[in-house]
């Protein structure tokens, strides 16, 4: 059982790796000895994250806007050059939109579905040649999609397109898992609960709001870098090699709260 959770030497791409949950996951992989490519739109923020993570190991930034076909192509091409054999693709970059039902704009669907769903599919598709090089029966290549508990149960927020997009990510995970299993590429989703990131800043910005939110979490706390990176590392190691098509809530019990 020694080395069961080892990911050292693996090549990993984490989209949205410049901050928040993506940065937590990227740091986990870097500290565990993987070579990690991180990506987001803002080149300067990406570069800062690369500098920060390079203190612990190997990290390379490649800025790209996944809302555009050119951005997806650029990230796929850049990744192929750095990692002709790609062991792990973490589709984490995501966007949200909030507005009351009567005012929710069509653009709030186009933006969120584009980044959260379409880009996940297209980037996976474009990186299949590199994932195939890494894939074997003993050690499959891994795709990890970041979904959300908002795709598993009804949220208290007015985030109509976001919730729909995350339910779509979960189903896309299952369908791509079925399509790629024969090629030894596994596809799983992590459905995070409440993590204190920029995306959640509006809901956690003061002590009272944070208490209200964490009171709804059965384990009475928000998620930490260890919680989310630990699940991603598990899925990417020998320990997670037999899972595919799973949607794993990492939510302190919110998805089963009474
Ligand atoms: P965040 O702090 O807002 O980070 C989002 C990341 O995605 C950033 O690196 C951002 O960088 C990047 N990004 C956004 N739009 C992009 C685009 N068009 N192209 C490329 N990169 C883009 O959010 P987070 O909370 O860490 O969320 C990460 C993932 O976890 C998302 O999929 C989110 O839905 C999911 N999630 C989060 C929570 C939570 O409690 N935080 C709960 C459930 C699920 P740039 O702005 O530089 O592009």
Image: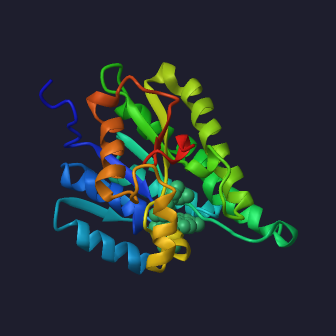
Q: Does residue 97 appear left or right of residue 231 in this picture?
A: right
Indicate the position of residue 194 as horizontal and vertical percent values: 48, 58
Indicate the position of residue 37 as horizontal and vertical percent values: 35, 57
Q: Does residue 57 appear left or right of residue 48 in this picture?
A: left
Q: Residue at x 19, y 55 (%)?
A: 31
Indicate the position of residue 148 as horizontal and vertical percent values: 55, 50
Q: Residue at x 47, y 27 (%)?
A: 244
User: Can residue 84 be seen at all in this image of the molecule?
Assistant: no
Give the answer, above or below, for where 159 lies relative to 241: below
**Which quadrant of the view contains residue 157?**
bottom right
Give the answer, above or below, for where 199 lies relative to 114: below
In the displayed image of the protein, which residue is found farthest to the right?
A: 102
Number of numbered discs on residues: 0
Q: Does residue 13 appear left or right of residue 172 in this picture?
A: left
Query: Can you say which quadrant of the picture contains the C terminus?
Result: top right
Indicate the position of residue 161 as horizontal and vertical percent values: 73, 58
Q: Nearer the viewer, residue 81 or 131?
A: 131
Give the answer, above or below, for where 104 lies relative to 226: below
Q: How is the image coloured?
A: rainbow
Q: Nearer the viewer, residue 95 or 104?
A: 104
In the displayed image of the protein, which residue is found farthest to the left?
A: 2
**Which quadrant of the view contains residue 66?**
bottom right
Q: Residue at x 42, y 40 (%)?
A: 130
Query: Can you say which quadrant of the picture contains the N terminus?
Result: top left
Q: Residue at x 67, y 58 (%)?
A: 162
User: Can residue 4 be seen at all in this image of the molecule?
Assistant: yes
């Amino acid at each position: 059982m020694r080395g069961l959770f080892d990911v050292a030497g693996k090549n990993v791409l984490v989209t949205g790796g410049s901050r928040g949950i993506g940065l937590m996951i990227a740091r986990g992989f870097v500290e565990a000895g993987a070579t990690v490519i991180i990506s987001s739109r803002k080149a300067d923020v990406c570069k800062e994250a690369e500098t920060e993570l390079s203190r612990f190991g190997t990290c390379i930034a490649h800025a790209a806007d996944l809302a555009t076909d050119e951005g997806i192509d650029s990230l796929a091409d850049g990744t192929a050059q750095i990692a002709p054999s790609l062991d792990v693709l973490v589709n984490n970059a995501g966007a949200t939109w909030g507005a009351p039902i009567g005012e929710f704009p069509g653009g709030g669907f186009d933006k969120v579905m584009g980044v959260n769903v379409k880009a996940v599919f297209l980037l996976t598709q474009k990186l299949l040649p590199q994932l195939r090089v890494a894939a074997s029966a003993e050690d499959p290549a891994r795709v990890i999609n970041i979904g959300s508990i908002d795709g598993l149960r009804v949220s208290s927020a007015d985030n109509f397109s976001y919730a729909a997009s995350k339910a779509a990510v979960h189903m896309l995970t299952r369908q791509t898992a079925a399509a790629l299993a024969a090629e030894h590429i596994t596809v799983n989703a992590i459905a995070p609960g409440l993590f204190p990131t920029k995306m959640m800043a509006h809901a956690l910005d003061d002590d009272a709001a944070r208490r209200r939110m964490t009171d709804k979490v059965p384990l009475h706390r928000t998620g930490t870098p260890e919680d989310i990176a630990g699940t991603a590392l598990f899925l990417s190691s020998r320990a997670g090699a037999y899972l595919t098509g799973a949607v794993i809530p990492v939510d302190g019990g919110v998805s089963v709260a009474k």
